[in-house]
């Protein structure tokens, strides 16, 4: 995604959140009217303060935890966008804006129709940030009208990041018939926004479609059937184009027109993820053999090969310089620009035990180690000296979000 969690927005109350006071002198603090708590930015956080713990609405984890009490997919798939001291929390039916200093709901919007599928809480992905707006897609039914039969549609809602956190605009796009008829799980994602175009993709089984929507006129710019868009950047929308069962090709389309600009080699069982600005990682089997590469989104050229033996590892970009990859009892860090191996930690190496990684952000790796929560330096793999107190699933400069007994809590960041 081109704009996601972690853009530095400051941690104090947003202008207009607090009630104005017409008096020329500030009111005296009283036990019944305590000063509003503020969050102090630390980029990146070194620890998290349990004294300011805030419980988030149940929507944050509904349908997402497994029997072991873990979040499937990890924090990157939580339906939450952190923006400064606010959390934009999405459900199939709406978005809530939460003040992370005190837990208040300070705004939000509801979807403008009936949800396409019931019990889809666990499928909702995080929204994306586009300047002063948070772009949220909803999967809704399209009622029958006149001679037109009922169908499915996306409603795209742009919620302002300023009080009162209401919709700046809305628009709808009709979906193909398969979105209503398929027995597979249907998932919608706001992929990214750049140069006035918002890219949204819908996928169900082998079916996929991506759309480019003008954020000024709110009109549909282009449609690409078969494309599951993954990343937006450098004037391109990049993703996987289904060509035959279990086989796709990496494709880049022009962000303004949707015209295909490049297509890579067919890949069996492909996995594509964002790997930093202008880069995607493509893993899978190609005609020339096993492929695990970093591709340039502008032209599809191979920027670098990933180190050998990592195709089964899941990697997360720290929104700085590093890909942190995990599988089983191993943690590996790779330079996002060159694909160079920075460090690896396997069970028993140098008397160390690899942590269970829960989040990576701005040069830090957060997780649970043999002795409790830990923070590692993403570039060197060294333990940081400060004990973080908790292992967050999602981090920005203001807070860490922590799973405890299947509920999600916000902890103030410390430095």
Image: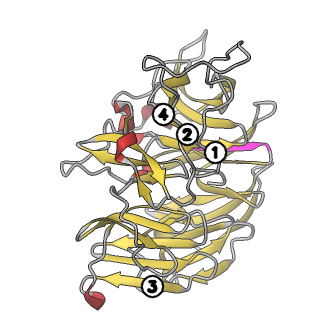
Q: CA distance from mark 2 to mark 4?
A: 16 Å
Visible residue check, residue 283? yes
- Mark with earlier residue (4, 1): 1
> Answer yes or no: do the residues labelled 2 and 1 have beta carbons within 8 Å?
yes
Q: Which residue does the numbered mark 3 point to in the structure image?
A: 343
Q: Secondary structure at mark 4?
A: strand
> Answer yes or no: do the residues labelled 3 and 4 have beta carbons within 8 Å?
no
From this view, report whether residue 306 is shown above or below residue 189. below
- Mark with earlier residue (3, 1): 1
Q: Residue pushed farthest top?
A: 146
From this view, report whether residue 25 is shown above or below residue 345. above
Q: CA distance from mark 2 to mark 3?
A: 33 Å
Residue 391 horizontal/vertical position (percent): 34, 57
Instruction: Write down the region rendered in magenta.
Output: 196-201
Q: Which residue does the numbered mark 2 point to in the structure image?
A: 85
Q: CA distance from mark 4 to mark 1?
A: 22 Å
Q: Which residue does the numbered mark 1 point to in the structure image?
A: 10
Picture disc at residue 90: 4
Q: Residues within 10 Å of mark 2 (few under 14, many from 20)?
A: many
Task: Give residue 182's quadrant in the image.
Answer: top left
Q: Residue at x 65, y 21 (%)?
A: 26
- Mark with earlier residue (3, 4): 4
Q: Is residue 299 left or right of residue 129?
A: right
């Amino acid at each position: 995604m081109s704009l996601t969690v972690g853009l530095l927005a400051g941690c104090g109350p947003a202008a207009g959140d607090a009630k104005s006071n017409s008096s020329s002198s500030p009111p005296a603090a009283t036990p019944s009217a305590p000063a509003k708590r503020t969050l102090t930015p630390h980029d990146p956080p070194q620890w998290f303060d349990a004294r300011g713990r805030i419980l988030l609405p149940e929507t944050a984890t509904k349908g997402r935890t497994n029997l072991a009490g873990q979040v499937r997919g990890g924090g990157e798939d939580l339906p939450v966008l952190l923006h400064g001291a606010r959390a934009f929390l999405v459900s199939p039916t709406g978005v809530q804006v939460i003040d992370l200093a005190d837990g208040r709901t300070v705004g939000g919007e509801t979807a403008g129709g009936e949800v396409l599928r019931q019990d889809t809480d666990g499928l909702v992905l995080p929204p994306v940030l586009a300047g002063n707006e948070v772009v949220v897609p909803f999967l809704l039914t399209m009622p029958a009208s006149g001679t037109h039969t009922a169908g499915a549609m996306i409603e795209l809602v742009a919620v302002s990041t300023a009080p009162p956190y209401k919709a700046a605009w809305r628009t709808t796009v009709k979906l193909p018939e398969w979105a209503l008829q398929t027995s597979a799980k249907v998932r919608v994602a706001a992929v990214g926004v750049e140069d006035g175009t918002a890219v949204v993709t819908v996928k169900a089984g082998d079916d996929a479609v991506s759309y480019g929507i003008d954020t000024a006129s709110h009109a549909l710019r282009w449609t690409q059937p078969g494309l599951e868009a993954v990343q937006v950047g450098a004037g391109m929308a990049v993703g996987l184009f289904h060509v035959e069962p279990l086989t796709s090709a990496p494709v880049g389309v022009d962000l303004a027109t949707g015209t295909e600009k490049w297509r890579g080699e067919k890949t069996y069982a492909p996995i594509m993820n964002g790997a930093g600005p202008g880069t995607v990682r493509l893993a899978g089997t190609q005609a020339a053999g096993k492929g695990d590469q970093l591709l340039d989104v502008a032209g599809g050229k191979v920027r670098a090969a990933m180190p050998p033996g990592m195709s089964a590892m899941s990697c997360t970009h720290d929104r700085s310089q590093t890909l942190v990859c995990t599988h089983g009892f191993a943690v590996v860090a790779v330079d996002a620009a060159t694909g160079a191996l920075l460090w690896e930690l396997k069970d028993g190496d140098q008397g160390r035990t690899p942590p269970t990684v829960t989040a990576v952000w701005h040069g830090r790796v957060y997780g649970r180690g043999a002795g409790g929560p830990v923070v590692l330096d993403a570039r060197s793999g060294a333990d940081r000296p400060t004990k973080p107190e908790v292992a967050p699933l999602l981090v920005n400069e203001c807070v860490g979000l922590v799973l405890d007994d299947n509920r999600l809590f916000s902890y103030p960041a410390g430095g």
